[in-house]
C-alpha cells in the first residue's frame, strides 16, 4: 500500500498511453457486457422456463396448429395438473418497425399456468370481463407508453383486418431478466373474429403435477396423439425455448468467439504496452532495486500497474454497458430483454483483472529478473 | 586508515580480500579486478581514480552488493556480503548502503520528497516518522524549500542533492558515489563535494567515491588509483579531513 503512490505516479507518466490502454479495456468490457446481455436475452426464455411446464407443438412444425379439442384430452393424461394454450398473432402496431410479440391465450388458464407472471387482481378481473382485453408486459408498456384503459390497434398480418384491444393490466416478470416485451389477449376474441383456423391453437402448455414426471408425461402425450392428423411433439419448456433460439443459428458460439477474440487481442495490446513501459523504465527499476526494493516487490509494482489499468477500464466499460444497454434493449426489442446482471458485472470485472494480470505477468517477470548492473549501465 | 596490502587486523568497516572479477565475453576472459585487497575504517573518505575500464565502477558495484565477485570476499560491518543470497543482499543494501550516481537517477514522476522517501517505504517507520526523516535529509542538502518539486523542475546540482538526500535518509553504514560530479558544472560540483565533505566531517559518514575529477578526488582523505584491475598506490591528499 505504501508503494501505491509510486504505482499511481507511473500510470500518470504517459497519460495518453495509459488512457488509450484503459480505453481498450473500456471498449472490450463494454462489448463483453453487451454480448453477455444479448446472450442472456437469447437465453432469457430458456433460463426463465419453468421446470414444471411442457410445451406441446405440432410434430411437423411449430407454425402448424393443433386442434382445440386436444385440451380436454391432455387434461386426462395422468400427471397433468393444468393445460393452457397460445396462438401467435403477428399484428403490426402502427409501423412494422414497432414489432412486439402478441399471443392469443386462454383467458381462464393462462395466468394460472404461468403463475410467475405478476398481474394485479384488478387487471386480472378486467381481463376476464372484456372480450377485447389485453395484458401488456412492463417493458412493452414502457416502450410505447401504454397504460390501463388505452386502446391498442393492430393490423393483422396472418388474420387480415384491424384488431383493437383494451389494456386491462400490465404484467411483470418474476425475475429481472423475465421477458415483459409482449402482449397477451383473449383467445376467444381471436376465435370469433378470424377468417380461418377456427377450432385450432398454436401450441399447448401443460403444467405438471410433479416436474420429475416430465419424461413419462411427455411420452404419454405424444403416444396419445400418435398416428393422428395432428401428431404432437412434446418437450420441456426449456428444450422448447432452446430450440426456438437455435432457429436463429448458434448465437452463443458466435458471441463466445467474438468475445474470445476481443480479449485475446486485448491481452496482446496490454502486454505489449506493459512491456514497452517496463523497457523504458529499466533504469528506474534498477534504482529501486539498488535502494532495496526486492525482486518480488518490483514484480508486484508492475503487476499492480497492469491490474489497475485493467480494473479501471473494466469498471468504466461495465458501467457504460449497464447504462447504455437498457436503452438499446428498448430500441431493439427483437433481441429480447437485455440487461447487465450483477453476475455479468462481477464476471466481467474478474475477467478484466485476469487479463490485466496475464498481460502484466511477462513484463513483470522481466522486471523482476532485471540485473541492476546491466540496467544501470544502459542509463 | 585505509590499507590495500591485505595485512590489516580486521577491525575495518569494509574489508576486501583477494577480490577477483572476471567477465566472460564469448571465449575471452576479461579480468576486471585482480586480487584486490582493501580495508576502510568507519568515517573514512576514499576516492578511487583511474582510466576508463580500470574497474572502478565494478569495484563500487561489488562493494554495494549489486554484483558478485568471481572470487574473494567482502565483509562490511561484520557481514560477508559475498556469501549472501540475492534476497538477503537486497535487504542488506537497504540497511547499509546509500548510492549516489553520476546521472542522479531520480524517479521523474515523483517529487523530491517522494524520491527521498523511497528507501523508507521499505522500513516499518510510520508516515509521520518518514516525513521527519525526509525533511531532515532534505535540510542537510539544503533543499527544504524544494520538497514538492519534480526532478524536471530542478537544476542538475539540485537533482544530485536530492539524490544525496535519498542516499542518506535511511542512515546507511556507508555511501557509494559513482562520479557524483561527473555531470555537473564546476560550481555545482563544488557544492556537491561540500555536502559530501560535511557528511564525512559532521555526520561521520564513510564515503567511497569513484571520480575522474581531480578536484573532487582531492576532497577525499585517501585517493586510490586503480589500473587494469589492480589498486596501484595509495596517496594521501592534503585537502581531506
Image (spheres, coloured by chain):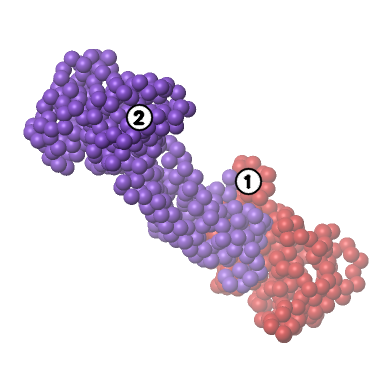
Chain colours: A purple, B red
Whether residue B132 can be seen here? no
Quadrant holding the N terminus of chain A:
top right
Q: Can you tell which quarter of the image residue B112 is in?
A: bottom right
Q: Find residue A328 and report its horizontal and vertical position in percent.
A: 27, 42
Q: Which mark is residue A224?
A: 2
Residue closest to the eye, B180 or B227: B227
Residue under numbered circle 1: B130
Q: Residues within 10 Å of mark 1 (few under 14, many from 20)?
A: many
In front of the other: A182 or A201 = A201
Quadrant position of residue B202? bottom right
Determine whether B240 is above or below A135 in the image.
below
Disc count in the image?
Answer: 2
Which element is circle 2 on?
helix
Residue occupying the point 35% across, 29% down: A224
Tell me the element at label 1: helix
* Gap between marks 1 and 2 measured at Cα: 86 Å
- Whether marks 1 and 2 lie on the same chain: no
Whether residue B222 sits left or right of residue A235 in the image: it is right
Give residue A37's position: percent from left, percent from top. 36, 42
Residue B125 vs residue A71: left or right? Answer: right
Q: Residue at x 66, y 69 (%)?
A: A373
Q: Is residue B43 above or below residue B72?
A: above
For the point 36% across and 50% down, the residue is A250
Return the x and y of residue A15 as percentages of the image width and height: 42, 57
Q: Chain of mark 1?
A: B
State the residue in front, B134 or A42.
A42
- Residue density around tag 2, few if under 14, some if 14–19, many if 20 or more, within 10 Å: some
Q: For marks 1 and 2, give the one nearer the viewer.
A: 2
Q: Chain of mark 2?
A: A
Amino acid at each position: 500500500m505504501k508503494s501505491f503512490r509510486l504505482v499511481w505516479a507511473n500510470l500518470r507518466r504517459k497519460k495518453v498511453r495509459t488512457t488509450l490502454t484503459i480505453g481498450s479495456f473500456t471498449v472490450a468490457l463494454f462489448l463483453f457486457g453487451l454480448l453477455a446481455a444479448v446472450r442472456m436475452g437469447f437465453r432469457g426464455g430458456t433460463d426463465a422456463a419453468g421446470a414444471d411446464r411442457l410445451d406441446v407443438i405440432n410434430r411437423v412444425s411449430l407454425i402448424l396448429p393443433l386442434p382445440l379439442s386436444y385440451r380436454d384430452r391432455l387434461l386426462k393424461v395422468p400427471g397433468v395438473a393444468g393445460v393452457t394454450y397460445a396462438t401467435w398473432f403477428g399484428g403490426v402496431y402502427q409501423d412494422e418497425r414497432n414489432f412486439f410479440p402478441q399471443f392469443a391465450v386462454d383467458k381462464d388458464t393462462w395466468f394460472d399456468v404461468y403463475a410467475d407472471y405478476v398481474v394485479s387482481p384488478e387487471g386480472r378481473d378486467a381481463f376476464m370481463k372484456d372480450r377485447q382485453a389485453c395484458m401488456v408486459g412492463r417493458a412493452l408498456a414502457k416502450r410505447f407508453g401504454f397504460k390501463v384503459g388505452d386502446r391498442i390497434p393492430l393490423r393483422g398480418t396472418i388474420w387480415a383486418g384491424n384488431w383493437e384491444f383494451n389494456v386491462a393490466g400490465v404484467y411483470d416478470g418474476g425475475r429481472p431478466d423475465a421477458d415483459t416485451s409482449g402482449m397477451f389477449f383473449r383467445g376467444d376474441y381471436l376465435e370469433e373474429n378470424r377468417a380461418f383456423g377456427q377450432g385450432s391453437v398454436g401450441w399447448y402448455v401443460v403444467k405438471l403435477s410433479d416436474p420429475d414426471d416430465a419424461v413419462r408425461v411427455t411420452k404419454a402425450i405424444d403416444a396419445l396423439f400418435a398416428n393422428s392428423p395432428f401428431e404432437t411433439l412434446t418437450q420441456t419448456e426449456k428444450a422448447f425455448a432452446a430450440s426456438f433460439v437455435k432457429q436463429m443459428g448458434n448465437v452463443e458460439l458466435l458471441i463466445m468467439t467474438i468475445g474470445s477474440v476481443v480479449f485475446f487481442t486485448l491481452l496482446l495490446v496490454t502486454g505489449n504496452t506493459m512491456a514497452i513501459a517496463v523497457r523504458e523504465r529499466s533504469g528506474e527499476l534498477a534504482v529501486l532495486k539498488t535502494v532495496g526494493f526486492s525482486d518480488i516487490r518490483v514484480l508486484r509494482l508492475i503487476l499492480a500497474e497492469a491490474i489497475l489499468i485493467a480494473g479501471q477500464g473494466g469498471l468504466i466499460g461495465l458501467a457504460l454497458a449497464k447504462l447504455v444497454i437498457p436503452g438499446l434493449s428498448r430500441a431493439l426489442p427483437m433481441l429480447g430483454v437485455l440487461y447487465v446482471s450483477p453476475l455479468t458485472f462481477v464476471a466481467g470485472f474478474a475477467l478484466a483483472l485476469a487479463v490485466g494480470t496475464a498481460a502484466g505477468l511477462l513484463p513483470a517477470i522481466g522486471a523482476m529478473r532485471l540485473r541492476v548492473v546491466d540496467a544501470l549501465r544502459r542509463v | 586508515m585505509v590499507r590495500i596490502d591485505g595485512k590489516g587486523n580486521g577491525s575495518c568497516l569494509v574489508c576486501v580480500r583477494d577480490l577477483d572479477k572476471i567477465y566472460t565475453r564469448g571465449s575471452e576472459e576479461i579480468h576486471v579486478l585482480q586480487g584486490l585487497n582493501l580495508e576502510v575504517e568507519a568515517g573514512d573518505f576514499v576516492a578511487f581514480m583511474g582510466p576508463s575500464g580500470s574497474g572502478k565502477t565494478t569495484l563500487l558495484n561489488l562493494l554495494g552488493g549489486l554484483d558478485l565477485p568471481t572470487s574473494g570476499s567482502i565483509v562490511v560491518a561484520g557481514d560477508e556480503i559475498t556469501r549472501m543470497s540475492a534476497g538477503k543482499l537486497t535487504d542488506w543494501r537497504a540497511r547499509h548502503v546509500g548510492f549516489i550516481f553520476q546521472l542522479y537517477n531520480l524517479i521523474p514522476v515523483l517529487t523530491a520528497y517522494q524520491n527521498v522517501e523511497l528507501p523508507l517505504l521499505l522500513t516499518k517507520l510510520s508516515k509521520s516518522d518518514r516525513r521527519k526523516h525526509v525533511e531532515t535529509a532534505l535540510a542537510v542538502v539544503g533543499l527544504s524549500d524544494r520538497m514538492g518539486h519534480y526532478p524536471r523542475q530542478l537544476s542538475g546540482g539540485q537533482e544530485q542533492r536530492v539524490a544525496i538526500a535519498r542516499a542518506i535518509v535511511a542512515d546507511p553504514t556507508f555511501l557509494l558515489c559513482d562520479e557524483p560530479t561527473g555531470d555537473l558544472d564546476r560550481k555545482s560540483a563544488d557544492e556537491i563535494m561540500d555536502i559530501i565533505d560535511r557528511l564525512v566531517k559532521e555526520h561521520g559518514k564513510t564515503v567511497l567515491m569513484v571520480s575522474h575529477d581531480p578536484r573532487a578526488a582531492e576532497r577525499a582523505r585517501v585517493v586510490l588509483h586503480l589500473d587494469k584491475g589492480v589498486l596501484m598506490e595509495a596517496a594521501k591528499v592534503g585537502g581531506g579531513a
